[in-house]
């Protein structure tokens, strides 16, 4: 009998442990094997999520952007010894805008049971709080770093929005937020709606949807603040 | 001082209350005004989420597909009397593949603070458990009911997938699942990957990703079972 691969949501903000459901605490107290994006933050999360086991009894393996396809197969090994594995990313849901999907796909191929646990996703929290179309939407991940390509991507997203009304969602490395915001405000039509969802569940949470022309009147400082951007109409 | 509009996740399956985080219990115990998709299931949810207030002290207003734009403005009234409102849909996150976004957008327009609470989304739980691309994806909501249009939509989604590798996610009214699945298996390329995520968090949960040719060898019975469908490669 093989083990189960549990996909465990962490938090967007480790100061808000009231967002961890009991289901997570139950699973981590019966799981000794973890595949994690970052070991230090995984230990921190497990602690605040109420793990009762000693850390010496736990086995951590790292899966990040440096993990090769050959290594991924190795990571699944405990499952074939009948042990469960918990997959954890640094923030939010594993395998969504984070590493992990290759491991999950391989698990399906090997006939392993994959069990997702519900929890916080900054993408969907931003979407529900935006007031923009939640019936159809596209998540694009990070926009291009290079300005010319970024601008052409922003224009493409706005055209797509005008065409089919799908909410267009994207993120940026926090220290490049200001550049991205500047480009959005410059390139988009005045009546296009922009939601900025910054520091979700943090003390300085700021989630606002306004037209581009309204945002231009007072540009928020979101430098280095984790944020999700959404375009709608 | 105006009240806050809290967006409160419910459950996908009311038999699994261990998925409700303390944050939800805290908010419902300090909120007396609710805008809900369905009053009966909202009461049921509040009960299992640990509400301590008597139901007589609560005020429920319904927001569903029959609510007119004029009514929506009325629903916000308690906020201007300084009272908080909790928005609840029948399952999962409000305003995502469910009513609510018009209310949230109006709240932004009226300068109301909107606060999303993290919780279960069948769409993202299916995505993380699928092993398919979680860096870029599109959610299409319901596919067309009429078969010819449904088939042309399925073909379009597969073409889009081949072009840019975005995971294509969609849902169907449970009693039409079998028709949809039949069309997917008939129309898609044998090597295209299909994830079926059925009855998420339910006792009969079934989440599997296989190629179309593998699925054809043994077609699961998902008639009347809530399911999310994902195409990937």
Image (cartoon, coloured by chain):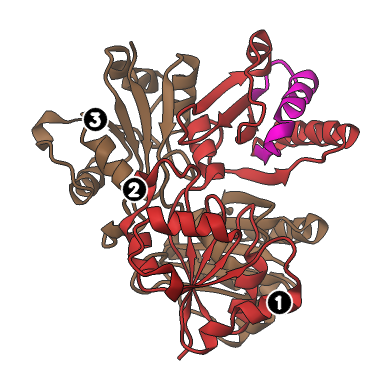
Chain colours: A red, B brown
- Are the residues flagged by discs 2 and 3 from a single subunit? yes
Pointer 2 local density, CA inside 10 Å: few below 14, some 14–19, many at least 20: many
Residue at x 58%, y 53% (from the top left corner): B144
Gap in angstroms between the C-alphas marked 1 and 3: 49 Å
Quickly name the residue at label 2. B10
Quickly name the residue at label 1. A71
Q: Is mark 3 on a helix, strand or loop?
A: loop
User: In this orientation, does residue A151 appear?
Assistant: yes
Q: Nearer the viewer, mark 2 or mark 3?
A: 3
Q: Which of marks 2 and 1 is in front?
A: 1
Quickly name the residue at label 3. B31
The mark that comes first in sequence, 2 or 3, is 2
Please, is residue B11 above or below residue B98 in the view?
Answer: below
Residue at x 62%, y 43% (from the top left corner): A137
| Most distant residue in the right direction | A148
Residue range in magenta is A168-193
Residue at x 40%, y 37% (from the top left corner): B65
Q: What element carries label 2?
A: loop
Q: Which chain carries label 2?
A: B
Residue at x 74%, y 79% (from the top left corner): A70
- Asked whether, in this view, residue B147 is left or right of residue A129, the answer is right
């Amino acid at each position: 009998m093989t083990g189960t691969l549990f996909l465990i949501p962490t938090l967007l903000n480790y100061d808000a442990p009231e967002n961890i459901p009991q289901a997570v605490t139950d699973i981590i107290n019966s799981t000794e094997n973890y595949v994690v994006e970052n070991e230090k933050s995984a230990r921190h999360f497990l602690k605040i999520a109420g793990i009762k086991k000693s850390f010496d009894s736990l086995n951590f393996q790292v899966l990040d952007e440096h993990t090769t396809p050959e290594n991924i197969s190795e990571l699944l090994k405990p499952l074939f010894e009948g042990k469960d594995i918990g997959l954890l990313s640094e923030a939010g849901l594993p395998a969504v805008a984070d590493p992990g999907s290759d491991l999950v796909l391989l698990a399906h191929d090997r006939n392993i049971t994959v069990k997702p646990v519900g929890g916080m996703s900054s993408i969907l929290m931003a979407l529900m709080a935006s007031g923009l179309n939640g019936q159809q939407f596209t998540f694009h991940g990070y926009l291009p770093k290079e300005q010319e390509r970024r601008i052409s991507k922003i224009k493409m997203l706005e055209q797509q929005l005008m065409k089919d009304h799908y909410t267009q969602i994207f993120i940026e490395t926090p220290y490049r937020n200001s550049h991205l915001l500047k480009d959005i405000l410059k390139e988009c039509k005045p009546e296009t709606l922009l939601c900025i969802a910054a520091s979700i569940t943090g003390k300085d949470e700021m989630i606002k949807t306004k037209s581009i022309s309204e945002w231009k009147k007072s540009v928020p400082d979101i430098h280095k603040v984790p944020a999700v951007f959404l375009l709608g109409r």
